[in-house]
Amino acid sequence: MSSLAMAAWPEVLAAQEQARERAKADGGEFETLDKDTAGEIAAIAEQIIPSTDGPGAREAGVIYFIDRALGTFARDEREAYRTGMAELQKKREEMFPGSAAIASLDDEQQKALLRSIENTDFFELLRTHTVLGFLGDPRYGGNRGKVGWKQIGFEGWMAYQPPFGYYDAEASGEKKE
């Protein structure tokens, strides 16, 4: 590989990442979920972390984190999603006869539906994945634009810098207040 190609490598990677993010922002393809299921899960995630006081699950791209998780580290939870979503759809039909989808329910209906399952293992799994997608490292598909980190004031540092505490500050000659 030429030195010119090597010099351009970081820019190529950055462009690929930008294209991937743009595709996701524009409704790009899912790796694991079909589009209809993704829309239903996204509607639930948006109730868990709504966009009322700032960016929520939608803006953070939580559905892309969940999709990627189900294809990688949470592969063994695919069946829990399949059965959980099937049961949730059955519950939706019981509570709101004639409704076509969770995403088509109004805000209050979605909340009532989620209250009816809030003590289930499936809801706990979905809630956990939603929070992870909102606050996790953006490299894993969620937290688009680091909106989750901005909400909690996290600056993205993945390492501590000395002095760590009172004794370290004293040893280094710095005073920690």
Image (cartoon, helix red, strand yellow):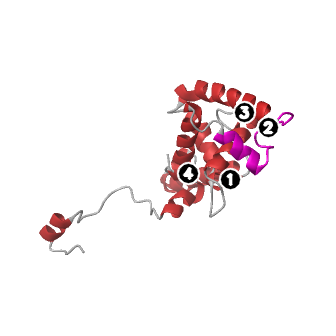
Foreground: disc 1 or disc 3:
3
The earlier-in-sequence mark between 4 and 1 is 1
Spatial distance from mark 3 to mark 2, Cα to Cα?
Answer: 14 Å
CB-based contact (under 8 Å), mark 4 and mark 1: no
Marking on residue 120? none
Examine the rendering and report whether any part of residue 29 can be seen: no
Mark 1 residue element: helix
Left or right position of 164 against 131: left
In the rendered image, the vertical position of residue 14 relative to residue 128, given as above or below? below
Residue at the spot x=22%, y=64% of the render?
165
Q: Which residue is the site of mark 1? A: 22
CB-based contact (under 8 Å), mark 4 and mark 2: no
Q: Which residue is the site of mark 4? A: 134
The earlier-in-sequence mark between 4 and 2 is 2
Spatial distance from mark 4 to mark 2, Cα to Cα?
Answer: 24 Å
Mark 2 crowdedness (10 Å alpha carbons): few <14, some 14-19, many ≥20: some
Marking on residue 101? 2
* Span of residues in magenta: 97-115
Asked if the stretch drawn in magenta spans residue 103, the answer is yes
Asked if the stretch drawn in magenta spans residue 132, the answer is no
Mark 3 crowdedness (10 Å alpha carbons): few <14, some 14-19, many ≥20: few
Q: Quadrant of the C terminus?
A: bottom left
Mark 3 residue element: loop
Q: Which residue is the site of mark 3? A: 34
Foreground: disc 4 or disc 1:
4
Mark 2 residue element: loop
> From this viewpoint, which residue is outermost toward the right?
98
In the rendered image, the vertical position of residue 46 relative to residue 89, given as above or below? below
Residue at the spot x=56%, y=42% of the render?
127
Examine the rendering and report whether any part of residue 116 can be seen: yes
Which quadrant would residue 34 be assigned to in this image?
Answer: top right
Spatial distance from mark 2 to mark 1, Cα to Cα?
Answer: 27 Å
